[in-house]
Structure formats: C-alpha cells, structure tokens
Amino acid sequence: MKEPRLVKFQRHENEQFSDFIKKLELQAVETAEERMPLYLKVGLKDASIVLDVGCGSGIVTRDIAHLTKGKVIGIDESSDMIRVAQKVLNRYRNVSLTVGKAEKLPFPDNVFDICVCNLLLMWAQHPAYVVSEMARVTKRGGKVLASLEPDYGGKLHYPEHAKVDSIFAGKAICDKGGDPHIGRKLRCLFVQAGLKTEVGIGNNRIWSCAEDKSYYLHARDFYVNALKHAGLTQKEIDEWEFSFLRSLDEGIQLNFFPQFYAIGAKP
C-alpha cells in the first residue's frame, strides 16, 4: 500500500524543520565566541529587562538568559519555533516567550533596557521596520544590538568550485527570500532608526580544516538539500562533496565570510 501523498509531504516538511533546528543549534555554539563579548559590551549583565527579537529555537536566548539576572522576553512569529524554544528554555525562570512579528512588536514605547537580534535581519522582509521597532521599544539611553549579520559578498573560499560556490555565496539565501548582503547595510539601518551607531566585524578567526569538517558533517543534510534545491544532480553533489572533504583532509581548504554586528544607543 502506497504512503498517502499528504503524509509524505508532512514527513518531508518535518525532516526539513528538524535539519534547520540542528543547524541553528550548531550556529549558536560556533558563534558564541563572537556574541558573548557583544552582550557584555552593551551591558547585558546589568539589564533589568531584555527583548530577544526573532528568538527562533531559543538556543541563543538561553545564552542571553545565562548572562543576565534580569527578565528576558523572546518573540518570534513562528509558533512552531516558539514551541521548540519552550522546551529549550523550560528551566529558566527569567524567560518568557510570545508569538509576534518583528516588524510590529506588541510592546509600548521605551520598555526594554536592551533589544537584541541574531541572524534575523538577513531574513526580514522589511529589515528597516524591524530596527525601527526595536529602537521604539528600547528605553532612552538603552541599546539595540544586531549581534550577527553576514555579508556573502565578502565570502572567500578556496579551492573554488564553479557550480557550488555561487550557491553558497548568496544564491541559496536569495532563493529562500533572504538578503545575503545585509551586513553592509547595518550602519544605514541603525542610523536611519535614530540610533547612535557602531558597526564592526565579529569574526576575526579563520576556522581550521578540522573545525570546518566538523561543522559540515553536523549540518550536512542542510547543505545537501540546498544543493538539491538549486538543481544539482546527486552525481554533481557527490562529486563536489568528495572534493570538498578531500581538501579538508589535506588541510588546504579555506573558508571565510564576514559577519557584521551593529550596536545602537538610543538618545
């Protein structure tokens, strides 16, 4: 008896969602060394109330909750993500979660000491609205932080691969509705929101080949699915993966792309 088409579709969707959650978990671990100094820089330890916009699975929110004794509110427009975050954060008494849109935050003006977002603006349909809303709900004298926003236009990769490099250098992001060049736009977004702005690059270290390989193998399903979605055949994917892993084992692979941060002080 054949499996019903709807059941197969739902199972596929569940697998994709599970792969995405795994990738978020790995990203949170790998970017902690970039994010933690920024949290300290904006005064997170002394904040009374913090908003995490686009909290997603709650894994980054957990880092924020560790660093402050204040109250942390996480908001995300996906009810599925909020359900995952509730499980991740169920032991934290200083965290509450809600469903809501980043472009229209359901809070009054001047409420939060600090508003943070991580890897959100790249996926926002209207990033200027998001930053303006974060500025609106932040108290005067408070801080707005975008802790990690990449710019694939600055991506460096070697050895090169003609078919795959363009996909991982922004095409896959565009195909999913994101902006692969959001990093260079942070200063403009923050200044136009009325914030006194500082921008910088958070990632100064280039990973070793062993770190690159560990990251890839952990999130392999996500990357293979991105290549399939871009139209590559299984043979093309297998050939690329073989050459990629070989270059890592030989110790010659180099990957780097800049990940920008922005800190805005509300006058």
Image: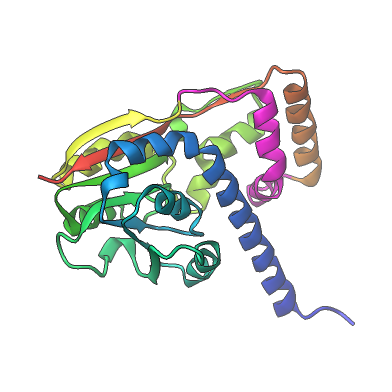
Seen in the picture, residue 8 relative to 48 is either above or below; the reply is below
Using the rendered view, name the quadrant where residue 50 is placed: bottom left
Seen in the picture, residue 208 relative to 39 is either above or below; the reply is above
Q: Is residue 194 magenta?
A: no
How was the colour assigned to the protein in this rendering? rainbow
Using the rendered view, name the quadrant where residue 54 is placed: bottom left
Q: Nearer the viewer, residue 171 or 193?
A: 193
The C terminus, quarter of image: top left
Which residue corresponds to the image point at 22% horizontal and 41% vertical from the top-left? 264
| Whether residue 151 is visible | no
Query: Where residue 4 sits: x, y (%)?
Result: 77, 81
- Magenta part of the chain: 204-232
Main structural element of the magenta stretch: helix, strand or loop? helix
Which residue corresponds to the image point at 77% horizontal and 23% vertical from the top-left? 249
Q: Is residue 177 shown left or right of residue 53?
A: right
| Whether residue 27 is visible | yes
Query: Where residue 123 sits: x, y (%)?
Result: 42, 52
Query: Where residue 229 sits: x, y (%)?
Result: 64, 52
Q: Is residue 142 shown left or right of residue 23?
A: left
The N terminus, quarter of image: bottom right
